[in-house]
Image (tube, grey):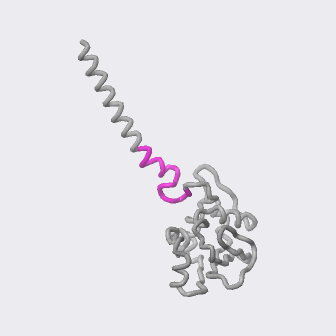
Amino acid sequence: MKNMNNKIVKDMFVKAIIVLAILSAVILLIGPTITGNFLGIFPEKNSGQGTAWATEDVSYEQLPGYIERSQFMESFPSEGKALLIVGEEKFTIKKGSVIRGDIQYPDMIIRFPEKYLDTLGKRGLCNTVREAEDKGDLAIQLQASELELAWKYKGMFKYKNCLGF
């Protein structure tokens, strides 16, 4: 009788382990898809690119802070400088900062239509940039050779699909 009880307990324990393993696999495989992270729709950290449960409005005033919180800014080169033109507004992007205004001799000029500002906070930076690029609305004008900029911005290549280059 005691052996039979031990066998039943062992069988239940093995079944519980199997169920836990299956549940863990389902959570690992399907969970990120539900939140959007599996598809890269939203960032893994709160970087101002949207979350699965909340959105934020992005206006011209909020755009500098929104970009500064994005993950790619961590890899922006210390000597890098870009001019972002959204509608009629100009923003200077440097390591760790985005300020409203023009800059002389940027490495690149990025023209981003203002109609995508509403989409930024809802869909995230990467998805919005990709959408603008797919529709032919994003323009990037290089002010130096591709080789020179490739070397200078090499730390940002991991974001190339996100940033449209």
In magenta segment, residue 142: no
Q: Residue at x 26, y 13 (%)?
A: 2
Q: Magenta span covers which residues? A: 26-43
Seen from the viewer's position, the closer of residues 12 and 96 is 96
Secondary structure of the magenta portion, mostly? helix
Q: Nearest the camera: 94 or 47?
A: 94
Q: Residue furthest front?
A: 78
In the depicted structure, whether residue 38 falls above or below residue 133: above
Left or right relative to 114: residue 131: left
Q: Residue at x 61, y 67 (%)?
A: 73
Residue at x 31%, y 30% (from the top left corner): 14
Residue 118: x percent and y percent?
A: 67, 64
Residue occupying image coordinates x 52% and y 54%: 36
Quadrant of image for the N terminus: top left
132 or 80: nearer the viewer: 80
- Position of 20 compared to 122: left or right? left
Vertical order, 87 against 96 (above or below): below
The picture places residue 22, in percent across and down from the top left corner, at: 37, 40
- Where in the figure is residue 90, as x and y percent of width and height? 72, 76
Q: Position of residue 40 (x, y in %)?
A: 51, 59
Quadrant housing residue 55 = bottom right
**Residue 61 vertical placement versus 20 (above, below):** below
Q: Is residue 41 magenta?
A: yes
- Which residue is nearer to you in this view: 6 or 128? 6
